[in-house]
Every structure is written in structure tokens, then in C-alpha cells.
């Protein structure tokens, strides 16, 4: 595990799997899975159905701003450029 992934794993809720890290957030009505991929230095957002059986990728514009800000804060705390959160794929 790299230093950056190790630092991200120390943030609340983040888990590392190989060269990626994942965190799950649950709001009042929506659930999201957020993934950071170290090899490509990118972030993907997935919206999770209420049962947790299905997740579909979603555009950043559909993700609540407070959640996106939290992800950027976690990235910055792990010495990962928070600007990659807004990178288009």
C-alpha cells in the first residue's frame, strides 16, 4: 500500500483494496459509494440503491456538494491533490 492510500485509509470510513480506496456515505435519502483509484488518480461516484444490491456510476453534478467537499477534504488530508475530484473521465 502506498503512503497516500495508507493515509486515506486512516480517514473515517475509507477502506483500501489493492490500489484503490472506497468509502460509503448515507444521506437522508441517498446512498453513495466513492472510489479513489491511485493508478489513474481519479475519483468515481456510485449511487447505491436502498437495498444495497445495485450501484450505478453517477456524474459529479448529481452528487450533493457537501459530500463532494468531504471527499476533497479527505483527499487533501491524505496528500492527494483535491482537484482530481472534479476531473472528468
Image (tube, rainbow, N blue to C red):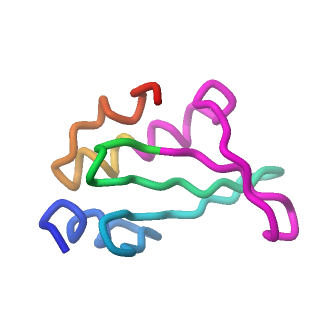
* Residue at the left extreme of this rendering: 3
Q: Is residue 32 left or right of residue 86?
A: right
* Residue at the right extreme of this rendering: 51
Magenta-highlighted residues: 44-71
Quadrant including the N terminus: bottom left
Answer whether residue 32 is magenta in the image: no
Q: Is residue 42 left or right of residue 6?
A: right
Answer whether residue 67 is magenta in the image: yes
Residue at (43, 46) in percent of width and height: 71
Toward which corner of the image does residue 62 lie, by quadrant? top right
Residue at (87, 70) in percent of width and height: 51
In this view of the protein, which residue sits in the foreground, 75 or 19?
19
Residue at (23, 52) in percent of width and height: 77
Instruction: Residue 40 in the image: state x and y as whole percent.
Output: 30, 45
Residue at (34, 66) in percent of width and height: 11
Taking 62 as reference, is 67 above or below it? below
Amino acid at each position: 500500500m502506498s503512503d497516500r492510500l495508507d493515509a486515506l485509509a486512516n480517514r473515517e470510513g475509507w477502506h483500501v483494496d489493492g490500489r484503490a480506496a472506497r468509502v460509503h456515505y448515507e444521506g437522508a435519502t441517498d446512498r453513495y459509494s466513492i472510489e479513489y483509484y491511485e493508478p489513474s488518480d481519479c475519483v468515481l461516484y456510485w449511487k447505491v440503491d436502498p437495498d444495497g444490491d445495485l450501484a450505478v456510476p453517477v456524474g459529479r453534478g448529481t452528487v450533493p456538494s457537501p459530500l463532494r467537499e468531504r471527499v476533497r477534504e479527505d483527499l487533501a488530508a491524505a496528500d492527494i491533490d483535491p482537484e482530481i475530484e472534479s476531473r472528468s473521465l
